[in-house]
Amino acid sequence: MRALALIARLFRSAAKIQRKRMILTVTAIAWGTVAIILLLSFGEGLKRSLQTGRRGLGENIVIIWMGETEKAYAGLPAGRPIRLLPEDVDLVLASVPEIASAAGEMHNWNVQLVNRRTALNKRVVGVHPAYEELRTSYPQSGGRYIDEMDQKLKRRVVFLGDQLAKDLFDGADPVGMTLLVADTPFTVIGVLQKKRQMGMYGGPDADRATIPLSTFEAMFGRRYLSNLVYKPTADALAPVAKRHLMEVLGAKYRFDPADTRVLEFWDTIEDSKMMNAIMIGLEAFLGVIGALTLIIGGVGVANIMFAAVTHRTREIGVQMALGARRLYITGSVVLESLALTFAGGAVGIGIGATIVQILAAVQARVKSEAMEFLGTPTISIPIAVTTVTLLGLIGLLAGYFPARRAVSVQPAEALRFE
Amino acid sequence: MFGNGRNGKNGKEGQNGVSNGAIIALTGIRKVYDTGAVKVEALRKVDLEIKRNEFVAIVGPSGSGKSTLMNIIGCLDTATEGSYRLRGEEVAGMSIDRLSDIRNRRIGFVFQNFNLLPQLTAFENVEMPLLFKGAPAKERRERVETLFEQVGLADRMQHRPVELSGGQMQRVAIARALACEPDIVLADEPTGNLDSAAGSDIIGKFEELWAKGHTLVLITHDGAIARRTRRIVHVQDGTVVDDAPAA
Ligand SMILES: Nc1ncnc2c1ncn2[C@@H]1O[C@H](COP(=O)(O)OP(=O)(O)O)[C@@H](O)[C@H]1O
Ligand SMILES: [Mg+2]
């Protein structure tokens, strides 16, 4: 304790002499810290924004479109279209153990929807109930999604996208109201919770109406699915699930399971892996830029410590003559360097955190697509840990080399220093 | 043979530094300062033995190598060549920290320019070696107070060095040198920056220390001071040219 007090005393008096340089250096470190915090927290905000945006489509799902065979198979020619049926969903669920959940989907791109005097031509989709979770289509409170009974009984119930509900009902709560879907009265059972959706096919979920698949088939006289959506039991099992699915359907429809043109897969698991890789790259890039700024500050600290060590050569010589061990000398230099670095770091963290908060507050007020996409800059715990670790590392290094120089001379030589 | 004048009376005990009681034993010590372009041979082939509780003056013209010699004796610097046995132990090859510990516990230094740290109080300056030794707070406090009484500066403990006279600063330095009760006290021109009264007072302190059993080595070019010691070693051109009991 007392030794620390002694170090602090000697440090303070050295600080007085080098005040201007010290202020400059602390400022440089603070600036570097602000830079790294801002860069990383913007990266974090963007990452979170992308995550929720992707969640709007569904979490780790695979979407299938139908195509045609490219290879001749079992005596059948190439170029044969393959169309999946609603019952294929049950087949896949029963035969592919790696698939946890699946739903069929049919689209009608232009259906007239009428509420009193408001008439709109919109997209209507028919889906299996599992679609709710697969495609994160949760109802706002007071409503519900399409369920098994709706499907079984071909009920005339409709679930509305939130934007569509607003447009049709002018802000009133539509749940329980009647809506004419292609001149047939349907009961509105729920409205989609507002969500940010980045991945989409055929337009946003917010702007369409959803009805039971069975009702859809009966009403529009359709047989084939537009898409099949499924979710593997685990992300890692996605390739196995895909292979088994191709084998099961290939056996039924007599196509080569290795034929890549029969079905087109949109694997959002692959997407998110790639996105994560890109985000890691981006974060590393931003982190490196921030770190470089910080390192420049660190060079300043090292410089000051070199100057301080030189300036105090004689003082160090006296301490060595009186029996100070190497660790005491190097330790005191490193401690001082750390003190300088963390002083700058504390200022920088304070300023950085304040800026981030102000930006978040501004963003909460100003609504714009671009801002929403950028996300809210966020200081996460890893960012804080990274910053503090970096500061510590820089402080250590900035002190270590001057400290080594300080103990590299013989006490006699240090004592001769003027 | 080692040394000259005083060797006669105990040469029979052999040349081993320990068996004949030599606390300091230099053999064939050479020191070359390599300053890039020029090499300065500050010491060449110095043989010197100093026994426990001797009171030795090292004298010689300026630039003859006295300080270099003292630095080597005090483990503040290492010799280029030769052997130095301190209390029978070879110093060459000792680790830096081991040398620090030796300086801390075995050797006290008094410098011409005092070398007190100006930021610290007199008390703190004297306390420093005890801190490096790792002595507990209470022991440090008591020891420092005793030392200040010993050098007659009990009322100046909380003063800064700038608030003290030269003689007082040197007495603080002596207190600091004695902090860890070293066997050896080395002083490089301790009176060089003092007026003759203060200088004489400091030498008086050294005489007291000698009486208490310390081994003292004192560099001076003041003949009067040298004569108050018990043995005078003459150094010239980096070597010992004369070594005789003080008259
Ligand atoms: N660190 C050093 N570097 C180079 N030359 C030195 C150094 N220290 C002493 N010398 C030289 O060594 C010689 C002896 O110096 P020194 O031991 O200080 O003599 P003294 O103390 O007897 O005056 C002188 O010529 C001096 O210039
Ligand atoms: Mg000298």
Image (cartoon, coloured by chain):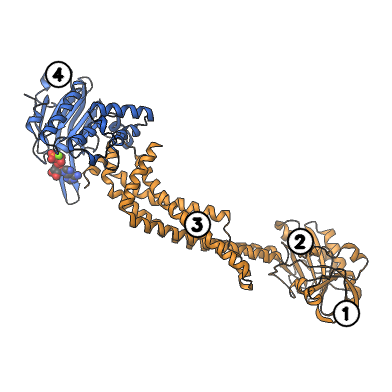
Amino acid carrying label 4: it is Asn
- Taking the image as shown, residue A332 lies to the left or right of residue A74, namely left
What is the CA distance from the residue labelled 2 to the residue labelled 4?
99 Å
Residue B128 lies, with reference to residue A80, above or below; the image says above
What is the CA distance from the residue labelled 1 to the residue labelled 4?
127 Å
Amino acid carrying label 3: it is Gly
Q: Quadrant of the C terminus of chain B?
A: top left
Residue contact at pointers 2 and 4, CB within 8 angstroms = no
Q: Circle 3 sits on which residue?
A: A350
What is the CA distance from the residue labelled 3 to the residue labelled 4?
74 Å
Q: Earlier in the sequence, mark 2 or mark 3?
A: 2
Q: Are marks 2 and 3 on the same chain?
A: yes
> What colour is chain B?
blue
Q: Which tag is nearer the camera, tag 2 or tag 3?
A: 3
- Crowd band around label 1 with a 10 angstrom C-alpha radius: few (<14), some (14–19), many (20+): some
Q: Are marks 3 and 1 on the same chain?
A: yes
